[in-house]
């Protein structure tokens, strides 16, 4: 395997960067801020999904008289069956964009450090360079690398995507159970 850093990852400006500490620091700071933005969005999306699921179930638990109202089961079932799964699908697309912003900032930070001759300055730099080398036969530009890295099963987006899917699927199942319970109790009352 060729261990040459792909050209699309290298600093392309002439002359080569000197050890410009401001640019190096700012590129790292930009990358950390993009990562923080991504993690904040994931945190808030999961918080919103869990709140949407927990609120109606908590209301049903606190106010036992609602348990006798089949219509309430149907409404809560519809909310749980529809809202979190739809929000989950949209949320995955949104956090994918934020993860791509982070990857873009990471690639820029790596380019700046390569241009300054600091390829071993941080484990993230080494990992990104190694990933670029490993996929250099599949990826021919930083744009393609961005897509590859964002969908990689070895990165955090993959796991957060599955957490959101599991929460959404659990909500869908709870919603279906409540819908069936509401429909069954309404048929018992009417029948």
Image (cartoon, rainbow, N blue to C red):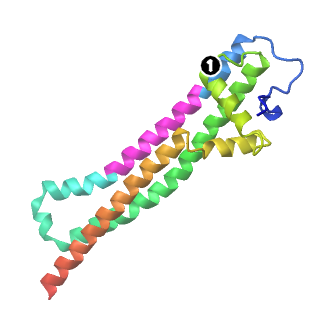
Residue located 64% across and 36% down the image = 103
Extreme residue toward the left, this view:
65
Q: Residue 50: percent from the left, percent from the top?
A: 33, 49
**Highlighted magenta segment, given as a residue range:** 32-51
Q: How many marks?
A: 1
The part of the image, by quadrant, that contains residue 139 is: top right
Q: Which residue is mark 1?
A: 122
Position of 68 with respect to 36 (left or right) is left
**Magenta includes 43?**
yes
The part of the image, by quadrant, that contains residue 72 is: bottom left
- In the figure, 89 relative to 147: above or below? below
The part of the image, by quadrant, that contains residue 126 is: top right
Residue located 66% across and 16% down the image = 121
Query: What is the quadrant of the C terminus in the image?
Result: bottom left
**Magenta includes 7?**
no
Q: Residue 114: percent from the left, percent from the top?
A: 76, 21
Residue located 23% across and 68% down the image = 73
């Amino acid at each position: 395997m060729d261990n040459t850093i792909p050209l699309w990852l290298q600093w392309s400006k002439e002359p080569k960067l000197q050890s410009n500490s401001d640019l190096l620091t700012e590129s790292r700071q930009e990358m950390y801020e993009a990562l923080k933005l991504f993690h904040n969005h994931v945190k808030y999306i999961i918080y919103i999904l869990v709140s949407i699921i927990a609120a109606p179930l908590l209301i049903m638990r606190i106010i036992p008289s609602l348990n006798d109202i089949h219509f309430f089961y149907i409404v809560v079932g519809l909310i749980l069956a529809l809202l979190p799964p739809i929000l989950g699908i949209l949320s995955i697309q949104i956090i994918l964009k934020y993860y791509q912003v982070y990857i873009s900032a990471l690639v820029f930070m790596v380019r700046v450090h390569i241009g300054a001759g600091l390829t071993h300055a941080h484990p993230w730099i080494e990992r990104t360079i190694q990933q670029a080398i490993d996929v250099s036969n599949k990826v021919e530009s930083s744009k393609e690398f961005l897509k590859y890295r964002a969908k990689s099963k070895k990165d955090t987006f993959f796991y957060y995507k599955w957490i959101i899917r599991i929460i959404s699927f659990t909500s869908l199942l709870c919603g279906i159970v409540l819908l069936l319970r509401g429909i069954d109790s309404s048929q018992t009352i009417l029948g």
